[in-house]
Amino acid sequence: MNILEISKKIIAEGPICDHCLGRQFGKLSTGLTNDERGRALKLSITMEADRLSKEGMDSSFLSSTEGNTCWVCNGLFKELDTWAEMALSKLSKYEYSTFLVGTIISGLLSENEEILWTESGTLYAEPLKSELNREIGKIISQKTGKEVNFEYPDVVVMLDIAENNVKLQVRSLYIYGRYRKLIRGIPQTRWPCRKCRGRGCESCEFTGKQYPVSVDELIREHVIEATRCAETKFHGAGREDIDALMLGNGRPFVVEAVDPVFRETDLRLLENKINEKSGGKIEVEGLKFASKEVIESLKSSKADKVYNLKVTFKEPVSEKNLIYAVEHLAGSDIKQQTPLRVVHRRADIVRERHVHEMELEEINEDYAIIRVHCAGGLYVKELISSDDGRTVPSLSGILGVQAEVAELDVVDVKI
């Protein structure tokens, strides 16, 4: 069946607009728009009907083209400017460089299109939503100067035809940096109160939090202010204990600004504000925009760590014996059963981690300072204490004297 014959069958179904007729052949002659295809087909059919009429033959199929409303799109293509204006109104509060249009079509329009495909037998049709996305995208682009991006748009404009509404899906903004934690007793992220689980109670002074502040919150406040985002999510390259300092070059992190209004944020200004307002609790540096993929890299990396440990002993230990124990652990593979302090939230299995270097830096009658460079995932406190024999070998095990980490500082995260 040729194109004109298929077009006659389509027209016989009822009034149809140029867009919907031309779209049934959207995969042909790609240099044309669908409404141009539709007009050309209708002109050809009109000429054919005129020829048949003059020859005394049936030309009644042409009457089906008459009517005010297209039965396929229900007049939707007459409202392109209206939909574009709705989208532009929603977009007006956001800062963006690229966008993409998507459409949720109603059940009626979807059914109409399926009926038409079935009755006409066309093999070259373009879906209704594809044309809507493209045509409204053209209008938005012309009026804003913004570019369409099919892979990573800053914002997706969703046209909900059934609800007669436009919704926006704004891509999160990702900011990478490193933080130093300069005082003890601060968790990396917000912890809900153990008693009320975040609801608020007397124990947490109705804050819903186990600890008054976190690294996350000290950064979050200023990211929200700078980007006008709805919320933030904090992604760290591992985490240090609450009672540990994070020093040296700092720990890599990404803060995700969810639904940001502003994307062109001055990161140097943001960095300075975080550091000035933290009250000496944290410092951040090296803030830069990043992609979502950086989060996966942070989460999946097994970064080596370097620690400074302040170690105390239940009984006096000679420098000679301590040097021997430290040198024995350096370069060793350590087998660790999940520590008792975290076994309630982690699988109780044995893990093997490597100690790359270990060095005694200072010793006196009260404590020793030991530097440890080890593989990510090694529980360094248990490397010292033995955790009732769950970590082998350990400093306590080799010395025969119980040792504990009194203070722990992370001085490098090697990513």
Image: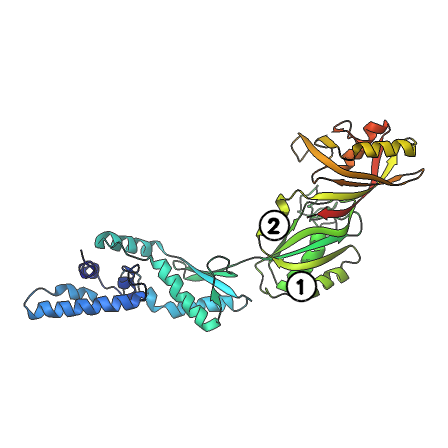
- Whether residue 214 is visible here, answered yes or no, is no
Q: Would you place residue 290 above or below residue 136 in this image? A: above
Q: Mark 2 falls on what kind of element? A: helix
Q: Amino acid at mark 1?
A: Leu
Residue 143 x/y as whole percent: 45, 73
- Whether residue 383 is visible here, answered yes or no, is yes
Residue 146 x/y as whole percent: 49, 68
Residue 252 x/y as whole percent: 69, 51
Q: Who's the residue at 71% across and 61% down the image?
A: 271
Choose top left, top right, bottom left or bottom right for residue 39: bottom left
Label disc, if present, on residue 295 of the rendered structure: 2
Q: Who's the residue at 73% across and 57% down the image?
A: 284
Measure the C-alpha gap from mark 2 to mark 1. 19 Å
Q: Who's the residue at 68% across and 59% down the image?
A: 287
Question: Image quadrant for the N terminus?
Answer: bottom left
Label disc, if present, on residue 119 of the rendered structure: none
Q: Which residue extends farthest right? A: 365
Relative to 224, is 109 on the left or the right? left
Residue placed under numbered mark 1 in the picture: 267
